Image (cartoon, helix red, strand yellow):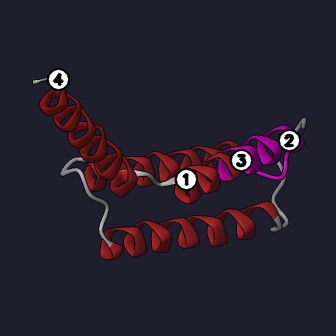
Amino acid sequence: MKKAILVLAGLMIGVIINVSAQTATPSIDHRQANQKARIAEGASSGELTRRETAHAVQDQRRIKRTERRAKADGEVTRTERAHIQHKQNKASRQLKRNKHDVQERPGA
């Protein structure tokens, strides 16, 4: 009886580890944190206008929403990861353009 309980517990732990590994997105999360820092730095230095900052923050919210939807079924597929990465690339390019354009927030 004890042996059966131990085997069952081991299987449950294996299933939990397997499911969490399929939904883990450390590279996406790291990139999101990096983008947020870039946005905050651009806003504080005046490189980003208020409108550009708002758009950048909204882009990050959309990416996070897409990530949550991908994780909802318990597995983030290769296609879903590629879709999220594409959105992150697009947001990163736009942020770079906005930070390096000639506009500056007055009074920053």
Q: Secondary structure at mark 2?
A: loop
**CA distance separating discs 4 and 1:** 37 Å
Is residue 89 depicted above or below 52 in this figure? below
Q: Which residues are magenta?
A: 35-49
Left or right, 57 with reference to 49? left
For this rendering, which residue is in front, 2 or 89?
A: 2
For this rendering, which residue is in front, 69 or 6?
A: 6
**CA distance separating discs 3 and 1:** 20 Å
Left or right, 57 with reference to 80? right
Q: Residues within 10 Å of mark 1 (few under 14, many from 20)?
A: few
Dot 3 or dot 1, earlier in sequence: 1
Q: Where is mark 2, residue-wise?
A: 106
**CA distance separating discs 3 and 2:** 17 Å
Image coords of residue 21 (percent x, y) = 39, 53
Dot 3 or dot 2, earlier in sequence: 3
Report the disc number at residue 2. 4
| Three-letter code for the amino acid on which mark 2 is drawn | Pro
Q: Judge depth for marks 3 and 1 and give the one in front.
A: 1
Q: Secondary structure at mark 3?
A: helix
Q: Where is mark 3, residue-wise?
A: 39
Left or right, 88 with reference to 101? left
Dot 1 or dot 2, earlier in sequence: 1
Q: Residue at x 41, y 75 (%)?
A: 82
Q: Judge depth for marks 1 and 2 and give the one in front.
A: 1
Image coords of residue 11 (percent x, y) = 22, 43
* Pointer 3 with pointer 1, Cβ within 8 A: no
For this rendering, which residue is in front, 15 or 10?
A: 10
